[in-house]
Amino acid sequence: MEGAQKNLDTEIPHWDFDRTRQELNSIWEQRLSQVTIQTNNRNDKEKFYGALYRASFLPRTFNDVDGRYPSFSTGHPFRQSANGRNYYEDYSMWDTYRALHPLVNILTPKKAGDMMQSLVDKYEQGGWLPIFPCWNSYTAAMIGDHCISALGDAYIKGIRNFDINKACEGMLRNAFRTPATYEEYKNGMGRRALNSYLKYGYIPLEDSVPEAFHTCEQVSRTLEYAYDDFVLAQVLQKLETSDDYFPDPQKTGLYDTLMIRARYYRNVINPSTGYAQGRYADGSFLTDAGNAFSFTRFITEGAPCHYTWYAPHDIYGLMECMGGKEKYIAKLDSMFSEHRYWHGNEPCHQIAYLFNYAGQPWKTQREVRHIMETEYLNAPGGLSGNDDAGQMSAWYVFSAMGFYPVCPGTPYYIIGSPSFPRMSIRLENGKTFTILAHNANKKIYISSQQN
């Protein structure tokens, strides 16, 4: 009660409704005006700023105004955030590592660093880096190990106001160890089915992953762990050449090991179909796997045709698994011509950008614009699915800018189709990043590009 009273006295000392409304308006004006766009189209303007607004809520501040917050996982004792930081909570990590966190890294890197330090704090307080931290607790919800992606992307993009060595310690623990007790594992600590992943190079169908909130989903887990292992390898490589690095003989050789594991996605691509498919411990694939377009238990919230494209760290390797460039393009074309693309589910979010890797950027430009026009409407129910803590909206913001982070954890963005003739982003360091795209409000395709 004392903390709540202090929050109230600090944040609304005057108890004046109109003044509070004006103060909130000023806060949002400052936030949203960080990005300015050139347009006379009110609908487009409201869609863009509506997306930027929705991408600004989570993760949320969890400490009182004096910096006190309940310990992660146990709730006690209360702790004190250091150096004026905020402690953040509610990371819908399976969703937000894709675009929401990369967007925060660009717009508010100091805040991004505090969010990453909050993940490190959770590791130090709970003993494991969380998989899907919500309600200030571990959960076994969703799949992957994407705190690695969020931490890795922040570090690779130059954010340094968090303890990367302690973060690396937690990431390595998740990647190589399982909890000592079944109770810890059941309560969401560590990677689900890690032992199977390490033993077989994929998670076989025999491992039903019973301790997870969503059981099975073996193929999706394999694909996402391979990506997370790649990001962790990039962090280790970057650390070795930085002033942040503290030599640790136990890390010797881990980069090579993780890069081998980053190729494990290949182990669940059925060479006879070119689609991701369930696989048994003896190495055989499902024999009734002819339909790659139906929901199935070994895929998370989707069909094999959706998750097949999930190797963001090795698209050219994926192309090879599919039988080469022409077959890759044919499969990618069919995602849109046969209406298989599903924007309402995050594993599809990078797919429209993958034409670039095959030398057909005009298809990326066409499909991204189509998605923006049909899946984002300025009306109630205008989103194609749950906004998922801002991920759906962050996709729109990036796509309106004209680029997208297909593979967070690398310093690269993939070009799409800018939506406005001019967009300026006011950066925290005082500089302004401006995107000029003449006639972008009338035309989709890019004729030339200059830096």
Image: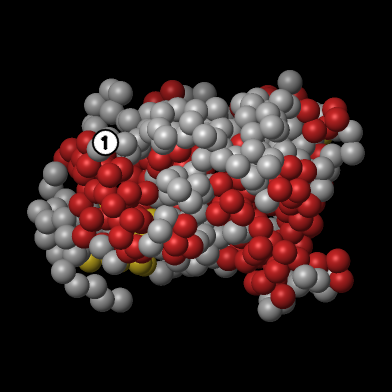
On the image, the x and y values in percent for residue 449 come to 24, 73
Instruction: Residue 374: give x, y in percent of width and height.
Output: 22, 36
Residue 205 appears in the rendering: yes
**Which residue: 61% across, 26% down?**
214
Residue 323, above or below 451: above
Q: What residue is rendered at 30% in x and 43% in y? A: 335
Who's the residue at 80% across and 67% down the image?
251
Asked if residue 183 lies left or right of residue 367, the reply is right
Residue 4, picture quadrant = top right
Front residue (pair 188, 113): 188
Viewer-closest of 228 and 80: 228
Quarter location, residue 261: bottom right
Q: Secondary structure at mark 1?
A: loop
Q: Nearer the viewer, residue 337 or 73?
A: 337
Q: In which quadrant will I find the C terminus?
A: bottom left
On the image, numbered disc 1 is attached to which residue?
339
Task: Tell me if residue 32 can be seen.
Answer: no
Taking the view exactly as shown, the residue that stands out farthest to the right is 180
Instruction: Give amino acid for label 1.
Output: His
- x and y, in percent, of residue 275 in the image: 44, 45
Please tell me which residue lies in front, 213 or 293: 293
